[in-house]
Image (spheres, rainbow, N blue to C red):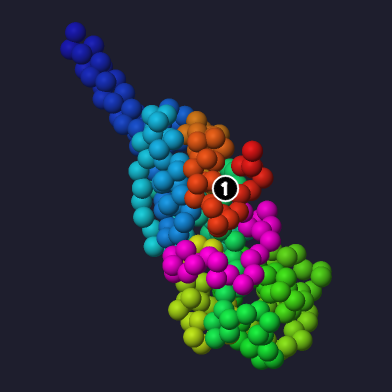
Amino acid sequence: MKKRTLASGIIGVVSTVLLLAGCGSNTEDSATEIRVGTSPGPYSELFLDGIKPILEEQGYTVTETVFEALLQADVALNDGDIDVNVDQHTAYLENFNENSDGDLVGLVSIPTVPAGIFGGRKAQLEDIEEGDIVAIPDDASNAARALLLLEKAGWIKLDSDVDPIEATSSNIAENPLNLDVIEMNSAQIPRSREDIDFGVIPGSIVYSADIPAEESLLSEDILEEYELVVTVKEGNADSDWAQAIVEAYKSDEFLDFVAEQNQDDYWFIPEDLQK
């Protein structure tokens, strides 16, 4: 009897430990808590305002961890400290995986705010002159999209042999106005407008810097690689909760919500979500 009681106790303790361990991980389809990592900008806010209520209606509990920068959120996601973030495009994600030995994947394209050329000391595109200073982001993925935008404006021409999403300043083949294209942290560009002639500012920074979107002098044509994506660890891509997020973004409820917020065409809606 004593041996049987002891064995039963051990089994009970082991079962309890395994149950608690299971509750601490969101790799199980039965998980009801979704831990989202948010970063400054409109994309996290759109998730909290438009997606979180839909998930909660389905019985999920959505908890938020705030990060000061997207890179911090990606590190936490890769380490399993959070489950999802919604603040990056595919090009940034792939760059993170390559440089940080990550295994993050994008599940579905979501609304994106285009990067744009904004005036600094000059107010119109036609004011461009030889030797003007043009600031672009210094991170690889956003620098490439900025260069594509400068090419769209007709100010430079990139080497035709270069993959557009991998372009750097060294790939500028033609610069007829000898523009001084300088790279700086994206968040610094709005603060430097008095010292530059023009700047290319990503949509998330336009939002966080409280710059009216209509001040954009020219917006980018968003390539698929620059569409924002719901991002999770690869092992969680097929989980019930991850697929619930995808379906929430595709739902009529969310698309109606976005339409109400998009009266000025601030958001680019990808084909994945178009009715």
Q: Quadrant of the C terminus?
A: top right
| Residue located at (58% from left, 56% from top) | 265
Q: Based on the displayed image, in which of its 4 quarters is residue 180 positioned?
A: bottom right
**Nearer to me, 84 or 153:** 153
| Residue located at (62% from left, 80% from top) | 124
**Is 214 inside the magenta-drawn segment?**
yes
Q: Which element is circle 1 on?
A: strand
- Residue 132: % across, % down: 63, 88
Q: What residue does disc 1 label?
A: 110
Indicate whether 248 appears above or below 164: above
Q: Residue furthest bottom?
A: 131
- Residue 202: % across, % down: 55, 66
| Residue located at (48% from left, 82% from top) | 192
Which residue type carries mark 1? Ile
Q: Residue furthest left?
A: 2
Indicate whether 231 appears above or below 202: above
| Residue located at (50% from left, 46% from top) | 260
Answer left or right for 261 relative to 105: left
Q: Which residues are magenta?
A: 206-229
- Residue 203: % across, % down: 54, 63
- Residue 112: % across, % down: 57, 54
Q: Based on the displayed image, in which of its 4 quarters is residue 164 positioned?
A: bottom right
**Nearer to me, 31 or 131:** 131
Answer left or right for 201 relative to 128: left
